[in-house]
Image: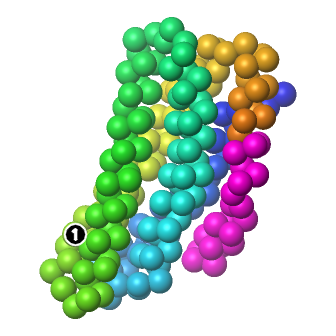
Amino acid sequence: MPLPVDVLIEEHKLIIQAISIIDKEITRIETQAVVDQNVVSTTVDFLRTYADRFHHGKEEGILFKGLSQKKLSEQDHQVMTELVMEHAFARRTVKALETAKENYFLGKKEALKELLESLKALVKLYPEHIKKEDTRFFYPCMEYFSEAERQNMMASFLTFNQNFTDKRYKQIIDLLH
């Protein structure tokens, strides 16, 4: 029977594809000195909506909330704290990216540096963050839950997903590839 974290790990695949697109955009900006407003706007929307509200929403609002009611090992508690801090860093970085994009397209060419720094920070953060979740945290943390609790968590994930369609974001990533 699949575990709730299998859902999260599957969602990571789309986030990694988006990060690959962002990395290519960084190279294009650095070599051509031109910013594709559509790609940057799409990046902001994808990371804010899919990665944060949809994906992190399940992690923080369901998984981490459930874990916060358990007696975690010191190591697991530390990793969960790091993950929450990384989510907050991603939110701040996406906001900085959006501001830099707006300033850049208002003619403030000095905003290009901030735009590139934000993109690079996201490309650096997400693969390491996802690797930490997938290899060090998700499966071990399932041991804190009974089978019934895991089933309830999976049901909560499915209920959460009913209020969101991720098909749009899969199509967007396919188009940008």
Residue at image point 26% right, 83% down: 104
Work out whether residue 24 or residue 139 is closer to the camera in this orientation and state it. Answer: 139
The region drawn magenta spans 158-177
> What residue would you read off at disc 1?
114
User: Looking at the picture, how far across and down is residue 123, in whole percent?
Assistant: 39, 58
User: Looking at the picture, how far across and down is residue 37, in whole percent?
Assistant: 41, 84
**Which quarter of the figure is the N terminus placed in?**
top right
Residue at image point 20% right, 77% down: 111
Can you see residue 120?
Answer: no
Q: Is residue 34 above or below residue 157?
A: below
Q: Callout 1: 10 Å neighbours few (<14), some, many (20+)?
A: some
Residue 12 magenta:
no
**Which quarter of the figure is the C terminus placed in?**
bottom right
User: Looking at the picture, how far across and down is residue 56, in whole percent?
Assistant: 53, 45
Q: Is residue 104 rendered to the left or right of residue 150?
A: left
Circle 1 SS class:
helix
Work out whether residue 162 or residue 171 is closer to the camera in this orientation and state it. Answer: 162
Residue flagged by tag 1: what amino acid is it? Glu
Residue 159 magenta:
yes
Can you see residue 108?
Answer: yes
User: Looking at the picture, how far across and down is residue 131, in whole percent?
Assistant: 49, 39
Residue 106 falls in image quadrant = bottom left
